[in-house]
């Protein structure tokens, strides 16, 4: 009877560790997606505002905003991949 209780306790501890790792990976992926969405939204809003203030610079502003948005997406993708790697480890 004692051996069964010890095995059950060990299984519960392993399950709790796995659940913590999986929830951490999910939270990390979610925060990466939310952060990139906020960042790209701010870039888009400020780019439109800059183009409205100086229409002659619209091409340069649009190019810069596109490059910045691509960099933010790259960082977000990297964060999500790291979160999934963490998920696979647990």
Image (cartoon, rainbow, N blue to C red):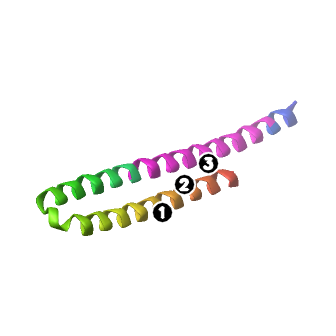
Alpha-carbon span between mark 2 and mark 3: 14 Å
Q: Which mark is residue 74?
A: 1
The disc label shown at residue 80, or none: 2
Query: CB under 8 Å between callouts 2 and 3?
Result: no
Alpha-carbon span between mark 1 and mark 3: 24 Å
Image coordinates of residue 2 in percent, x first then y, are: 85, 34
Which SS class for mark 3?
helix
Which tag is nearer the camera, tag 1 or tag 3? 1
Whichever of callouts 2 and 3 sits on the residue coming sooner in the sequence is 3
Mark before the other along the chain sequence, 1 or 2: 1
Magenta-highlighted residues: 8-35
Q: Which residue is mark 3?
A: 21
Residue 82 is situated, as x and y percent measured from the top left of the image, at: 58, 59
Numbered-mark total: 3
Q: Which residue occupies the extreme top position in the image?
A: 1
Along the viewing direction, whichever of 24 and 36 lies nearer the viewer: 36
In magenta segment, residue 32 = yes
Residue at 54% across, 54% down:
80
User: How many angstroms separate mark 1 from mark 2 (CA)?
Assistant: 10 Å
Of circles 1 and 2, the one toward us is 1
| Residue at image point 11% right, 59% down | 53
Magenta region includes residue 12 = yes
Q: Residue furthest left?
A: 53
């Amino acid at each position: 009877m004692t051996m069964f209780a010890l095995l059950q306790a060990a299984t519960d501890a392993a399950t709790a560790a796995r659940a913590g790792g999986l929830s951490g990976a999910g939270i990390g992926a979610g925060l990466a997606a939310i952060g990139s969405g906020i960042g790209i939204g701010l870039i888009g809003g400020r780019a439109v505002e800059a183009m409205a203030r100086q229409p002659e610079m619209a091409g340069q502003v649009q190019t810069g905003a596109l490059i910045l948005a691509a960099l933010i997406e790259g960082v977000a993708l990297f964060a999500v991949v790291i979160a999934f790697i963490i998920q696979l480890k647990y």
